[in-house]
Image (spheres, helix red, strand yellow):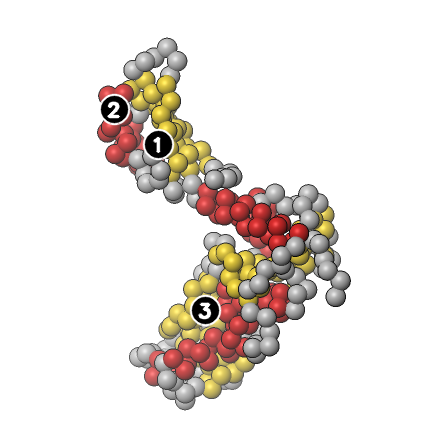
Amino acid sequence: MKQRDRLRIAMQKSGRLTEPALELLNRCGLSFRQSRDKLFCFGEGEPVDLLLVRDDDIPGLIAQGVCDLGIVGRNVLDEFRLTTGREAAPLVELRPLGFGRCRLSIAVPQELDYQGPQTLEGERIATSYPGLLGEWLRTHAVNAGVVTLSGSVEIAPKLGTADAICDLVQSGGTLVANQLREAEVLLESEAVLAGPLALPIDERGDMLELLLKRLDGVIQVRESRLLLLQTSRSSLEAITRLLPGGPQPTLLAVAGQPDQLMLQALCAGEVSWRQLEEIKKAGAREMYVLPVEKMLA
Ligand code: PRP
Ligand code: ZN
């Protein structure tokens, strides 16, 4: 196979992960000549292209070396790792991406008296995740039939083709609509950046390293806020005690007002109105809470 010199990322063509994945890549400075109806998106600024595919195909494309990376649910990645033989190249989770959170759960009909894993003994469970379900059943020493379906898993109990299901749950709406309730959580999932255990050691490797640094910068500051305020030196100690966690604040002098200081603090999470009101009571004035867009340490 001819060596590629551009990095290629596989991601879901249309689904819950598509928009947030594209937004994250944009924040990392990557933009693409959009041809969303096509399979391939050419990267404009950096030598990074996209391949838009079905999410279940993503791990295989990385394992075959067709793509260098993938943005995919942990559920899909783990299922692939459990169900492909040792001949496939090993894949790893390079970064959790913090969006597309959901869980893989076993759900049972609402009226079933669920008493724990043994309730499932001898029952049939419909799922698109036979690998993950099979592993859980072995761990809990439950003998159950696994009915593998590629979709519409939630209607299997009503159709009589299964007694329970094992599927993704996000809001829980699908379960409620089908008179099912969650009985066991098998996996907490979210979108991850997946790649091969052995990363390329050419130009693609350099680009990948750069991309990972940018990703870390974006992920790290996504929830961060920069708090700016003015205070007199006498109130400084009381205010500092109230600041939401994070590194030590920076203090700046205010021209012509030797008693006054500008304080700048990076806060790890959202700063609430209540917190602001408390800090104001301690003597702060002119307070600003700003979102943080990029970080490069
Ligand atoms: C998943 C899952 C459920 C639904 C759960 O399907 O299979 O049907 O989401 O979400 P809820 O708890 O918010 O109702 P998805 O829409 O991701 O499509 P897919 O199964 O075809 O990938
Ligand atoms: Zn799917």
What is the residue that sits farthest to the bottom in this orientation? 122
Amino acid at circle 3: Leu
Q: Can residue 121 be seen in this view?
A: yes
Q: Which residue is drawn at 37% across and 73% down?
A: 183
Q: Which of marks 2 and 3 is in front?
A: 2
Report the side of 160 relative to 285 (left or right).
right
Q: Which of 200 and 57 is in front in this view?
A: 200
Disc 2 residue: CB within 8 Å of ligand 1: no
Q: Is mark 1 on a helix, strand or loop?
A: loop
297 relative to 212, above or below:
above
| Mark 3 Cα-neighbour bin, 10 Å: few <14, some 14–19, many ≥20 | many
Residue plotted at (41% across, 77% down): 136
Residue 93 location (% of width, % of height)? 51, 61
Who comes first in sequence, dot 3 or dot 1? 3
User: Circle 2 sits in a helix, a strand or a loop, which is it?
Assistant: helix
Question: Of circles 3 and 1, which is in front?
Answer: 1
Near-viewer residue (289 or 79): 79
Report which residue position mark 2 lands on: 235
Give residue 130's position: percent from left, percent from top: 51, 78
Relative image position of residue 30 (x, y in whole percent): 63, 46
Residue named by callout 1: 249
Disc 3 target residue: 104
